[in-house]
Amino acid sequence: MTAPPPPAPAHRVPAAAPGGRAPAPAGSGAVGGGGDGPRFGYGTNGFANHRLADALAVLADLGYQGVALTLDHDHLDPFAPGLARRVAAVARRLAALGLAVVVETGARYLLDPWHKHAPTLLHDDPTRRIEFLRRAVRIGADLGAEVVSLWSGVRPETVPPATAWDRLVAGCATVLDAAEAAGTTLGFEPEPGMLVEDIAGWRRLRGALGDPARFGITLDVGHCRCLEPRPVPDCVREVGAYLVNVQIDDMRRGVHEHLEFGAGEIDFPPVLRALDDAGYRGLVAVELPRHSHAAPAVAARSLDFLRAATKEAARRER
């Protein structure tokens, strides 16, 4: 038996402004300006071998300001018993540690133990996926999450492209209805190899949904280097008005592999400059889902790198 939905939250973060920008939190500031600079977070999918409470404590101790929380069997399972109680406990833990949160929905085998990411919104029966995303929206609202992120999935070989597209639009519309009712912002992530894999695909999808204000973009910086035709900073500026969630990692052209900073081809100070130019004040969360074996060390190195890149961005600006 699945857990009942959690009760309506007593408090929520302000909704994203029209155009998709998240509200500026206290203490945010420009790169090289008078504020604190970007708010860096870390994805819990890179702490898969840690208890969630321990992962949050490590990240807070390192100096991160937020987390990208992937709902999964080991980190706030949305289908396990006692969901409302567990969500409330995580909310208290986040508040005690001073961590902001976005909710990610990229768990690999949460819905099907045999098939990665299945079912998606593109499958013949997307019921389980839609229920998962609805629960993610409710959980996000109760946690005070700034964004709930989702993606399209890979088109099954047996599903024609036009059918897959129609299913995606219909599924996103259903989830969007839940998000609007909950006062939650959605960030849709273009993912290499999926039906919507680039910014152009995201724009097409948003248009098909009627350009809703609560349907922004989750931009993975590495994905831009992997397959977008324009330089990464230009990609950031292109979608700046709709940017509600940022994942950051290094990557190489044409290879979808999330790398530690410095192991790929991205020059990060211009990327951070572009985020500031776009007026983005949401979390910039490290996305290294295959590095759980050395999570604390990788997280420490990542934050050191990003802080140095922030200083370098300010130096170049001067």
Image (cartoon, rainbow, N blue to C red):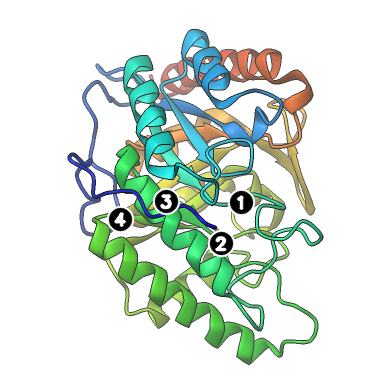
Q: Which residue is mark 4?
A: 20
Q: Position of residue 110 (x, y in %)?
A: 66, 52
Q: Earlier in the sequence, mark 2 or mark 1?
A: 1
Residue type beneath disc 2? Trp
Residue plotted at (73% across, 27% down) = 292
> Is the C-beta separation of discs 2 and 1 under 8 Å?
yes
Instruction: Answer few, some or many: residues within 10 Å of disc 3's Cα (few below 14, many 20 plus, some between 14 and 19).
Output: many
Whether residue 280 is visible to the viewer of this picture, yes or no, is no
- Secondary structure beneath label 2: loop
- Secondary structure beneath label 3: strand
Residue 151: mark in rendering: 2
Residue type beneath disc 1? Gly
Instruction: Answer few, some or many: residues within 10 Å of disc 2's Cα (few below 14, many 20 plus, some between 14 and 19).
Output: many
Residue type beneath disc 4? Gly
Q: Position of residue 274 (x, y in %)?
A: 43, 40
Residue type beneath disc 3? Val
Instruction: Answer few, some or many: residues within 10 Å of disc 4's Cα (few below 14, many 20 plus, some between 14 and 19).
Output: many
Q: Earlier in the sequence, mark 1 or mark 3?
A: 1
Give the spatial CA distance, label 1 vs label 3: 11 Å
Give the spatial CA distance, label 4 vs label 2: 17 Å
Q: Nearer the viewer, residue 173 or 54?
A: 54
Q: Is residue 60 left or right of residue 11?
A: right
Q: Which residue is mark 3?
A: 148
- Secondary structure beneath label 4: loop
Residue plotted at (50% across, 14% down) = 57
